């Protein structure tokens, strides 16, 4: 594993950092207050090629490595974790299932549009009674002639209502457990497919999270991804990669929390000197810095393994588990360092505090990461 970035990776880091400062940062206030999806920011991300970083040039992407994509999520999330998750879900679980499991026709039809940002992607796995136990999902897909008829509902769908394509998981065989689940590409205007309520969330304002319903929704059989019964494995395999994206997002929040805490501590004076000279504060900063560095190593190690074609299931879960915990811990400490000011909306650490929590929940709760990691350890 290399501990330094290549010239190309440094280039993307500088480009995204610049974009985050000049385009994302000015949009944050409106995203926070109005909880509005940052269409214009996402449009510009598409123009810059950020919505297709690890997608081969053949399909309209930038043809860069996965590490470069992780760098982009990390840098964006230092400024806006909501923009970070829009990119992560769009790419890891909205586009990659088609890239890895789609037919050539499906790839040619959808990937160039997704990679260029003409389309936004979403992933619809979770249901009201099937969250951590994703394999118990109930949405049905019944084959009728050359169509599948989908009936059911989904919840907590990131990018929902804004996306053009949804990777939807539905049960084609009710008797076959996780082997009876299939994946479909469903376009937003398909008859019988409705966008439901938008969740009012604690944080991640600007990122949309909605319910979906399928009522006799007819999807051409050509929209089936892979074979019937492949759905659960498609979901799990893409979540393995997706979790590295959420680790990078968590890392962004943690690092931003540290940077804001250091800056504030140096400028804030109490008892006649900066609080950065008080051991109580310094020790907090030392712990935060150490945890951020460890989260960085785990996250980039997972990305680098993926680039080398090595298995990532275990390390992706480890990275997500550790980085999301670090995001929460660092955001809490950053608020503490800011004292009363940190509890107000005048300081970004209040937002980091609210944004961090969901990193321990989505794309598999930390409890699920423990299951995945321990399963790997036992098998090894
Ligand atoms: N890759 C490929 N195949 C896998 C796999 C993986 N990572 N993990 C499991 N499988 C396969 C198994 O090999 C098994 O195959 P066979 O039938 O051939 O034996 C099959 O899938 C079933 O495996 P399990 O028995 O291990 O499945 P399980 O029902 O016990 O569930 C679980 C395992 C890890 C708990 C899984 O349900 C899980 O990951 N749950 C969390 C769901 C989740 O992460 N949801 C996130 C929603 S998306 C989201 O949050 C996006 C967002 O908004 C940001």
Image: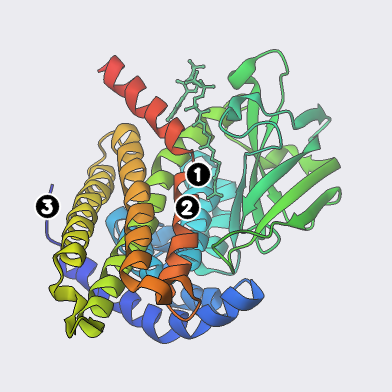
* Pointer 2 local density, CA inside 10 Å: few below 14, some 14–19, many at least 20: many
Q: Is the CB–ligand 1 distance for label 2 below 8 Å?
A: no
**Residue 268 or residue 59, whichever sits in front:** 268
Residue at the far front in the pictured view: 271
Which of discs 2 and 1 lies nearer the camera? The answer is 2
The location of residue 68, given as percent across then percent down, is: 29, 61
Which structural element holds mark 3?
Answer: loop
Q: CA distance from mark 1 to mark 3?
A: 30 Å
Question: For disc 1, does the CB lie below 8 Å from ligand 1?
Answer: yes
The residue tagged with tag 2: helix, strand or loop? helix
* Label 1 or label 3, whichever comes before in sequence order: 3
Number of dots carrying numbers: 3
* SS assignment at label 1: loop
Q: Nearer the viewer, residue 196 or 191?
A: 196
Q: Which residue is mark 1?
A: 361
Task: Where is residue 332? Give x, y as percent.
Answer: 37, 59
- Residue under label 3, please give it: 2
Q: CA distance from mark 2 to mark 1?
A: 7 Å
In the rendered image, residue 9, in percent from the top left (x then y), is placed at 23, 66
Q: Would you say the residues marked 2 and 1 are in contact, meaning their CB atoms lie under 8 Å apart? A: yes
Residue under the image location 41 percent in, 45 percent down: 243
> Which residue lies at the image location 73% right of the left edge and 37% below the top edge?
221
Which residue occupies 73% across, 50% down? Answer: 211
Q: Between marks 2 and 3, how big is the CA–CA gap?
A: 30 Å
Q: Is 244 placed above or below 199 here?
A: above
User: In the rendered view, would you say 170 is above or below 72?
Assistant: above
């Amino acid at each position: 594993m290399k501990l330094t970035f290549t010239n190309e990776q440094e280039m993307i880091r500088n480009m995204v950092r610049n974009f985050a400062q000049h385009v994302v940062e000015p949009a944050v206030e409106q995203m926070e207050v109005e909880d509005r999806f940052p269409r214009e920011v996402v449009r510009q991300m598409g123009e810059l090629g950020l919505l297709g970083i690890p997608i081969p040039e053949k399909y309209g992407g930038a043809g860069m490595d996965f590490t470069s994509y992780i760098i982009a999520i990390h840098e964006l999330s230092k400024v806006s974790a909501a923009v970070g998750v829009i990119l992560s879900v769009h790419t890891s679980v909205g586009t990659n299932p088609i890239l890895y499991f789609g037919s050539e026709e499906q790839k040619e039809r959808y990937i160039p549009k997704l990679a260029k940002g003409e389309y936004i992607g979403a992933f619809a796995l979770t249901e009201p009674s099937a969250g951590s136990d994703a394999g118990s999902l109930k949405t049905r897909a019944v084959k009728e002639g050359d169509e599948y008829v989908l009936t059911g509902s989904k919840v907590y769908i990131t990018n929902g209502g804004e996306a053009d394509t949804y990777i939807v998981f539905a049960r084609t065989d009710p008797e076959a457990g996780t082997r009876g689940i299939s994946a479909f590409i469903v376009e937003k205007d398909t008859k019988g497919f409705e966008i439901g309520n938008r969740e009012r969330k604690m944080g991640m304002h600007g990122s949309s999270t909605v319910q979906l319903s399928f009522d006799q929704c007819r999807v051409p059989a050509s929209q089936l991804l892979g074979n019937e019964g492949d759905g659960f494995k498609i979901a799990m395999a893409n979540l393995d990669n997706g979790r590295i994206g959420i680790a990078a997002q968590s890392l962004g929040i943690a690092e931003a929390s540290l940077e804001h805490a250091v800056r504030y501590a140096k400028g804030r004076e109490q008892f006649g000197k900066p609080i950065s000279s008080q051991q109580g504060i310094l020790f907090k900063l030392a712990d935060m810095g150490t945890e951020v560095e460890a989260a960085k190593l785990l996250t980039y190690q997972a990305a680098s393994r993926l680039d080398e074609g090595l298995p990532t299931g275990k390390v992706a879960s480890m990275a997500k588990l550790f980085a999301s915990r670090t995001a929460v811990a660092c955001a809490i400490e950053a608020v503490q360092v800011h004292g009363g000011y940190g509890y107000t909306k005048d300081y970004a650490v209040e937002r980091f505090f609210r944004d961090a929590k969901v990193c321990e929940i989505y794309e598999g709760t930390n409890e699920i990461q423990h299951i995945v990691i321990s399963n790997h350890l036992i098998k090894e």
